[in-house]
Image (tube, helix red, strand yellow):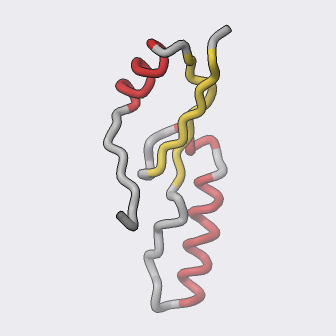
């Protein structure tokens, strides 16, 4: 399909990968660049985009505010 959907919970991913010998190294959330509140107003669109970038790259990205979750696991030795 042209899109990708994964409906795994954090809890499932953490347990599944833990059982396979991995541990969570880092997790964060971003908008994934998908927010476009003002597509017909170039200036507002640009301002909104900059604000979202600020939030995406701030400590707020530790909380599931947006729908893109990035989880990095490392193999336990």
Which of the pair 5/36 is nearer the observer? 5
Seen as rendered, the residue at the extreme front is 1
Which of the pair 19/65 is nearer the observer? 19
Q: Residue at x 49, y 39 (%)?
A: 63
Indicate the position of residue 61 as horizontal and vertical percent values: 56, 44
Indicate the position of residue 62 as horizontal and vertical percent values: 55, 38
Q: Quadrant of residue 13?
A: top left
Indicate the position of residue 44 as horizontal and vertical percent values: 54, 83
Question: In the figure, is residue 38 to the left or right of 45?
Answer: left
Indicate the position of residue 41 as horizontal and vertical percent values: 50, 90
Q: Residue at x 60, y 76 (%)?
A: 47
Q: Residue at x 47, y 50 (%)?
A: 68
Q: Quadrant of the N terminus?
A: bottom left
Total marks shown come to: 0
Q: Residue at x 42, y 51 (%)?
A: 67
Seen as rendered, the residue at the extreme left is 7
In the image, residue 46 sits, relative to residue 18, either above or below, namely: below
Q: Quadrant of the C terminus?
A: top right
């Amino acid at each position: 399909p042209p899109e990708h959907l994964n409906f795994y919970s954090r809890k499932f991913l953490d347990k599944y990968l833990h059982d396979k010998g991995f541990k969570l190294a880092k997790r964060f959330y971003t908008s994934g660049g998908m927010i476009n509140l003002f597509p017909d107003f170039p200036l507002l669109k640009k301002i909104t985009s900059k604000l979202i970038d600020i939030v995406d790259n701030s400590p707020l990205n530790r909380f599931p505010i947006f729908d893109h979750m990035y989880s990095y696991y490392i193999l336990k030795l």
